[in-house]
Image (cartoon, rainbow, N blue to C red):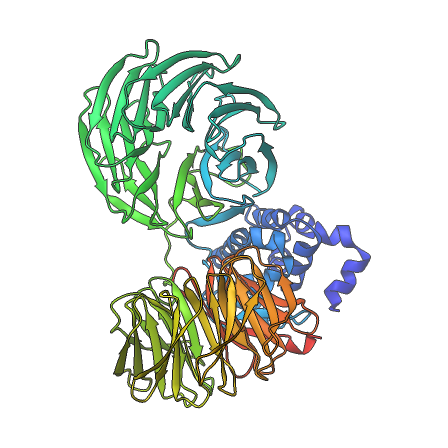
Amino acid sequence: MSEFEDFILEEKEYVLNLPYHLASASMAEHLCNLLTEFDYLNYKISASEVQLIIEDYDLALQPKIKISDEEKQSLQLIQNAILLSARVLTEEPTQLASQLMGRLMSFKNISIQNLLAQTKQWNVIPWLKPLMPNLIPPEGNLLRTFAGHKSYVRAIVVTSDGRHTVSASGDKTLKVWDLQTGKELRTLTGHTEEVGAVAITPDGRHTVSASGDKTLKVWDLQTGKELRTLTGHTEEVGAVAITPDGKHIVSASWDKTLKVWDLQTGKELQTITGHTGWIGAVAITPDGRYIVSGSADKTLKVWDFQTGKELQTLVGHTQTVIDIVIVPDQQMAVSASWDKTLKIWNLQTGKELRTLTGHTDLIWAVAITPDMQIVVSGSEDKTLKVWNLYTGKELYTLTGHTNSVIAVTTISFNKSLTREFGQKIVSASADKTLKLWNLYARTKQSPLIGHTNWLRTIAITSDGQIAVSASWDKTLKIWNLQTGKELRTLTRHTREVQAVAITPDGKHIVSASEDKTLKVWDLQIGQELLTLTGHTQGIGAVAISSDGKHIISASWDQTLKIWDLQTGQELLTLIGHTREIGAVAITPDGKHIVSASWDKTLKVWDLQTGKELRTLIGHTREVQAVAITPDGKHIVSGSDDKTLKVWNLHTGEELLTFIGHTDGIWAVAITPNGQMAISASRDNTLRIWNFENGNVSASFYNDDRFLCCGVAPDGVTIVAGEDSGQIHFLRLEGIDLIQ
């Protein structure tokens, strides 16, 4: 226990509030030292709320606290790093060390380097230390991530004071969040199908939701109480808007109608018809005189609010119009379409003014900043794009979501907030999260290293010097495991590379691709030596026998094939699985193959004869990963059912189930001593499991979904890959603390 911790035991409350006391006394140097001391940050985050630490930095950054510009920059970077990690630290405070290392390592400020030097010495529990910067750095646009929904987030709206956001989800709920603290305040339940749209009254007292259950609901935002249900639509209600005076609701439905309702009574006042396809978007002009709708019939229509009369039809999109935003005082609207474009329209004339192109997939959402200068769009391509409204020029792209960006909204400037909210936006995604962004921060950091698409598999040479990665960007990359430096890129596959293995002597690489081929490469020079063909669909996994003579491939065509590595000759085809095979492993003695399939089973095969020996049944979803212990006695499998299972290889008996991941497990590796398993999950975490007791010994929380992992012969160096293509180099610290 450190001297600092001894002091804590005597004066807990005083120490927790020490930044306030130091700031009140204008003791700038002491305050800065405290906020760059790892032991203090670690204690306060474990003993109180993360938001309180974030506010401590606000105290230090007050004008009355006289500190140098470099010190101020250091504090701002540390504060922003903690803000980016707030969700993780709230869930798991012991992640502070790995989060600080992953986000701050690239910064050379003296105070930051001193903080990281202290962080590296932390040895209270085992932890995974990043060896290179591997998390989103704190000088970019992303400020915070909100997680809590169990399904995709379909819609978001922000209160007019900029303090709260309400999200609507496929999990049939709405959630109310505090934008400043990141806290989930309440969950609104009542809908029986997904909630696809949400709006808030101008006074911020009520929210209105629209659902696939064909209803709208009015809620008290303060209490979360459901006030009334509006029925009348005959199909899903996909969009909703509230008039500027807060008196009326306008809903848009898949039944091809718009309806106008009295918000206070819930009475249906008017039904508007005219679209020939379902209606997915609706907006009301700021003067309340006009309704603008967007439809699957590829048009926008402008309607008179009072009479319901159709005034204009705006034609130009070639696919569904899914979102609309009105430009206040400019008589313009911006539409988002599944044709991958945004269009800007003059509402008076119905004329198309310009088209914004740049997204590579359908667009789901559009918003405009309060200053009416900037358009922000969200797309199926997982990005947000920022555009100049008047020139149509794309200014930059925001990345960070790991699935489609389905909704986006802007936050108005509000001086009353503790942390200035200026030009910020909130996005919502199919990755089940919301993200808060600083729209005008410009990222300067170097891109994190790796591939440009999913990094699907990692293999490591037996001497621990080299790692090879396989990616959906159609390439393999060879890395120096000691320095993290990329040595070479191999580029002969014509489709996504799904898997890679290395021969025991470290001389050759075998890769498996969606192009239905395996390729054998010379690792030293990167030359392609052989191409193996025979599978009728993409190949998802590959393994090499311990004597280096045989290749085993597993394919989406539901077969495994055994090949002669030297000649490339196909020797045997193994048939038995009823779905795609996504993983394969070979026992250390080279006698048995274990395959993992989307049919929810594993199978054990005799390598010499190709005979199926047994089927392992127990997983309830697709089995995505498999590994075998070094002694050849046990199998470890990972599944989309979020569990790891340990099996007796010779009997097929299920011995243990490891529970803890909150999403599918796509990779598993076993340490050379056979005592620990490492799992990589789409819940953004790596976990180290102790075989002895089934506990998680250490974990690492990422910004993106992990897809693969490997462990070096030293048993502590771990390499992992993620959705974005980034490669991670980590070291397990405190291994002597693992019981």
For the point 46% across and 79% down, the residue is: 611
Residue 101 seen in the current view:
no
Assign the C terminus to one quadrant of the image: bottom right
Instruction: Please identify the quarter of the rendering in which residue 237 is found.
Output: top left
How many marks the image carries: the answer is: 0
- Up the image or down, 144 lies above or below 353; here it is below
Query: Residue 19: where, in percent of width, then height?
Result: 66, 51
Position of residue 493 measured from the top left corner of the image (x, y, whole percent): 26, 71
From the viewer's side, name the closer residue of 425 and 119: 425
For residue 507, which quarter of the picture?
bottom left
**Which quadrant does the N terminus fall into?**
bottom right
> Measured along the vertical axis of the image, is residue 533 above or below residue 59?
below
Q: Single out the residue that lies furthest toward the right.
A: 10
Q: Residue at x 54, y 51 (%)?
A: 83
738 relative to 355 in the view: left or right = right
> Eyeballing the image, is 148 above or below 294?
below
**What residue sits 28% from the left and 37% below the top?**
337
On screen, residue 232 above or below 451: above
Give 241 or 610, whichever is nearer the viewer.
Answer: 610
